[in-house]
Image (cartoon, rainbow, N blue to C red):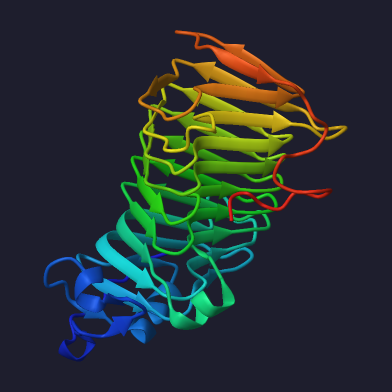
Amino acid sequence: MREMTPERNPSDQSSSQSYGSTTMREMTPGDATCLSEGAFRELCGTGAVRLEGRAVVLEAPIKVNANETLSIVGPGSIVGSGHSLFQVGGRAQPFGLRLRRLALRHVGSPARRAERSLGACVFALGKGVVDAEDCDLRSECGFAVWLKQRAVCRLRNCRLAAARAAVAVFNFSAVRLHACDVADANPHGICARGCARVDVEASTIRNAGVRGVYAYMSPTVALKDVVVSGTRDPTAAAVQVEALRPGDAATLALDGLRLDANAGRGVAVAGRVDVTQAAAPVLVHRAAATGRYAFGEGRPRNPCM
């Protein structure tokens, strides 16, 4: 499918429109030309877009549905105050949504704050596939990346920051990060629940409010040549994996993990967690299995929220 480049149109420019607590001037770098939401949606309908330094402000998500593909190439910035900037479903391969050299900013709105709606820069569900490279993803009110069901996300050389968990991975979904920087998330840099899979390689996870990585129930977590630093909760481990209920079973594979200046323990596991280590093994604290998760009676609430 051919890529379409938006034409410059002076009527598309705006530098003072306000979204929540953030102005358009604050959200778009320099004097970037702004493309209208309508024009951008029309271009997305072709399946391939080149932004060429332009900025877009969205009031509602761009949806990529079953068997659809969308490729957006920057440089450029996309800002939105809806539930998410992109919602990706379907099962298109090798991707449903492909992002290159983009800055994504997910900002708050009064209506969503009143509803306590979090949202994300990128929200994928079903068997949706997201592939991002050389991107900067930031959410001031939710997640940078949110995966549910059997969605898959691949991130390479990306920077992620969020008001909540930067990467939230639920159910049977999977995320792979290579050469990425995850910073300033709260409570956790990466949070995985259920049978989710997390693979992180040659990356940094910095300054999380509670934990750099938290995974529970029956996840698979692999950390290779990863630095986790600057967690701020002295009662929590920088990396924690728990499998506490009957039937839960988790896996934690460590290869070259480095821990630096974290407020609490380094690595902690509890319950039926199989731990393997390769290069430069670290001390793993194994806590007694209580049979229940500490953050809720019965079915645990989501600690990423």
Residue at horizontal 64 percent and vertical 56 percent from the top: 91
Residue at horizontal 38 percent and vertical 48 percent from the top: 160
Left or right of 74, for residue 201: right
Left or right of 174, for residue 202: left
Residue 242 shows in this picture: yes
Residue at horizontal 53 percent and vertical 58 percent from the top: 96
Left or right of 216, for residue 88: left
Residue at horizontal 37 percent and vertical 55 percent from the top: 137
Front-lying residue, 289 or 33 = 289
Left or right of 192, for residue 223: left
Q: How many marks?
A: 0
Q: Position of residue 199 (x, y in %)?
A: 53, 32
Q: Position of residue 161 (x, y in %)?
A: 38, 51
Front-lying residue, 60 or 204 = 204
Q: Which of the 4 image quadrants contains residue 262?
A: top left
Above/below status of 242 relative to 107: above
Above/below status of 109 relative to 1: below
Q: Quadrant of the C terminus?
A: bottom right
Q: Position of residue 268 (x, y in %)?
A: 60, 23
As drawn, the residue found furthest toward the left would be 31
Q: Quadrant of the N terminus?
A: bottom left
Residue 3 shows in this picture: no
As drawn, the residue found furthest toward the right would be 246
Q: Position of residue 13 (x, y in %)?
A: 19, 84
